[in-house]
């Protein structure tokens, strides 16, 4: 098995922290993150370089410089149930974690559990899908895993399968597209992978391709936009940093969007979709750690929103699109792990953000209702939309829609049940419809 933390055929990177070595994501990444010139000279050149550019303004705000969860890197973060969730992984002391934290504002965090049902591991992937959070694969103290776990609340975890169709692996990526979860690339006992798998239930997996058009890789990122999967950058089996973007609608047939994006080559970066665009944030190239932000509407043409965000240069960072904002959470600097949290609304990127995608004409009929209610809303443009029913305390009772939607009138039915299929009591509820901006909200009353 190609191992990550503490050994194996390939040791995944070395950075010096407080007199010890810390493993991050590959021996090659150590070389990628080393400075090739003196720190002072590099800083001067970098500042002069930025001064000569006319990049669009992008504002970042620090939600907290020290979140309640300990500093960490390589940690998945998902948006689920009206909150952001941090799901375990590595720390300064080399020990992976399986703790779970959640927050509604990025500043105040609650530990849901200090020890989730899945084992402590690294190199795993996580997604929010089908009203649940999911953990997929990785490597623990016993070696590589291809197990799949799910949870409705972050506290109670169910092992959906101990042996998914894809091989035991680590440093793969995952995405959600067309009503399925997708696992892409990574590495297993035979080396780096370029296979693609999908599942609608987490237990049964279908091979889309055993050899995608893109080369086998780790340290890459994957997102979904407008019904298409995107794979961005990473590191190949020869330890070369990659600067390519690939796209597919079915996971089997891949098209090269670009082999020379504006952001160059990139490893251990993060990507998300916000404001109708694919965003790439941070990571490392062949010279240094980065804190830049780039966006593209099609994966081929990229624009630099900022070459130097307020958050410090870092790799193995987490990001998520939540509450109409982009969030950056923790990661690894050149000297330590981090636990700061930042957000941005993409200010100055008017070419991408055209305005609220959800029209104000949100209707629920009948209202009040007893058994079934129909939610109707209009989208001004195609967007990844979320429709939630919440109680008076703001808790998500049921997610009715969480998928890419075309422009125009949309309808979805609620049968009065919660996310576990239980009938909710009579009372007042609120329907929230999110695009990439603030929610549109409608009050709803259920009768006895």
Image: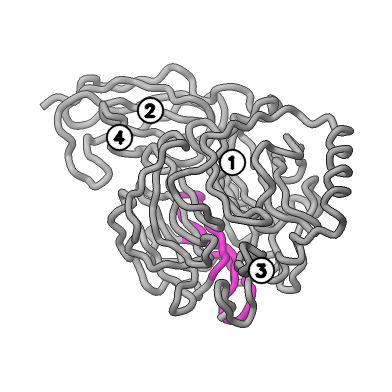
Q: Earlier in the sequence, mark 1 or mark 3?
A: 3
Residue 139's spot in the image, x, y percent? 49, 72
Quadrant housing the C terminus: top left
Residue at point 23% right, 36% down?
415
Q: Quickly name the residue at label 2.
A: 432
Give the CA separation, mark 1 to mark 3.
31 Å
Q: Within the magenta stretch, is there residue 188?
A: yes
Residue located farthest toward the left when viewing the structure as drawn: 448
Q: Quickly name the residue at label 3.
A: 14
Residue 273: mark in rendering: 1
Residue 330's spot in the image, x, y percent? 56, 48
Residue located farthest toward the front when viewing the structure as drawn: 19
Q: Earlier in the sequence, mark 2 or mark 3?
A: 3
Q: Earlier in the sequence, mark 4 or mark 2?
A: 4
Residue 447 seen in this snapshot: yes
Q: Is residue 23 above or below residue 407?
A: below
- Label 4: which secondary element: loop
| Callout 4 crowding tier (Cα within 10 Å): few <14, some 14–19, many ≥20 | some
Dominant SS in magenta = strand
Residue located farthest toward the top when viewing the structure as drawn: 361
Q: Earlier in the sequence, mark 3 or mark 4?
A: 3
Residue 395: mark in rendering: 4
Find the magenta span and give its range.
Answer: 170-198
- Label 2: which secondary element: strand
Give the CA separation, mark 3 to mark 4.
42 Å
Q: Earlier in the sequence, mark 4 or mark 1?
A: 1
Residue 295's spot in the image, x, y percent? 70, 39
Q: Is residue 376 above or below residue 385?
A: above
């Amino acid at each position: 098995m190609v191992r990550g933390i503490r050994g194996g055929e390939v040791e995944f990177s070395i950075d010096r922290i407080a007199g010890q070595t810390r493993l991050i994501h590959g021996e090659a990444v150590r070389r990628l993150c080393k400075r090739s010139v003196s720190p002072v000279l590099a800083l001067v050149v970098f500042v002069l370089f930025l001064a000569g550019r006319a990049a669009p303004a992008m504002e970042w705000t620090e939600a907290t410089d020290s979140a309640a969860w300990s500093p960490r890197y390589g940690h998945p973060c998902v948006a689920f149930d009206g909150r952001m969730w941090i799901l375990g992984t590595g720390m300064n002391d080399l020990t992976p974690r399986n703790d779970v934290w959640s927050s509604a504002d990025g500043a105040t965090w609650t530990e849901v559990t200090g020890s989730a049902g899945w084992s402590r591991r690294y190199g795993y992937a996580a997604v929010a899908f089908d009203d649940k959070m999911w953990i997929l694969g990785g490597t623990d103290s016993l070696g590589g895993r291809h197990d799949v776990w799910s949870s409705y609340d972050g506290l109670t975890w169910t092992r959906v399968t101990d042996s998914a169709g894809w091989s035991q692996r680590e440093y793969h990526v995952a995405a959600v597209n067309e009503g399925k979860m997708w696992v892409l690339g990574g590495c297993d006992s035979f080396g780096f992978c370029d296979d693609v798998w999908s599942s609608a239930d987490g237990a049964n997996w279908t091979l889309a391709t055993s050899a995608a058009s893109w080369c086998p890789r780790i340290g890459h990122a994957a997102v979904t936009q407008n019904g298409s999967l995107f794979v961005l950058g990473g590191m190949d089996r020869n330890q070369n940093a990659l600067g390519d973007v690939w796209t597919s609608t079915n996971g089997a047939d891949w098209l090269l969007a670009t082999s020379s994006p504006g952001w160059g080559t990139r490893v251990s970066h993060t990507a998300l979709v916000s404001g109708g665009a694919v965003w790439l944030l941070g990571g490392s190239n062949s010279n240094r750690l980065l804190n830049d932000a780039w966006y593209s509407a099609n994966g081929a043409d990229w624009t630099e929103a900022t070459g130097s965000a307020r958050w410090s240069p870092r790799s193995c960072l987490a990001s998520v699109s939540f509450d109409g904002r982009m969030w950056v959470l923790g990661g690894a600097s050149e000297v330590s792990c981090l636990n700061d949290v930042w957000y941005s609304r993409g200010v100055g990127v008017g070419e991408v953000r055209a305005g609220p995608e959800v029209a104000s004409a949100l209707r629920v009929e009948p209202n009040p209702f007893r058994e079934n209610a129909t939610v109707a809303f209009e989208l001004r443009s195609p967007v990844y939309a979320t429709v939630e029913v919440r109680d008076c305390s703001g808790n998500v009772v049921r997610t009715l829609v969480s998928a890419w939607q075309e422009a125009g009138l949309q309808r979805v039915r609620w049968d009065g049940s919660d996310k576990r299929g239980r009938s909710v009591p009579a009372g007042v509820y609120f329907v929230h419809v999110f695009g990439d901006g603030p929610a549109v909200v409608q009050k709803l009353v259920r009768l006895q």
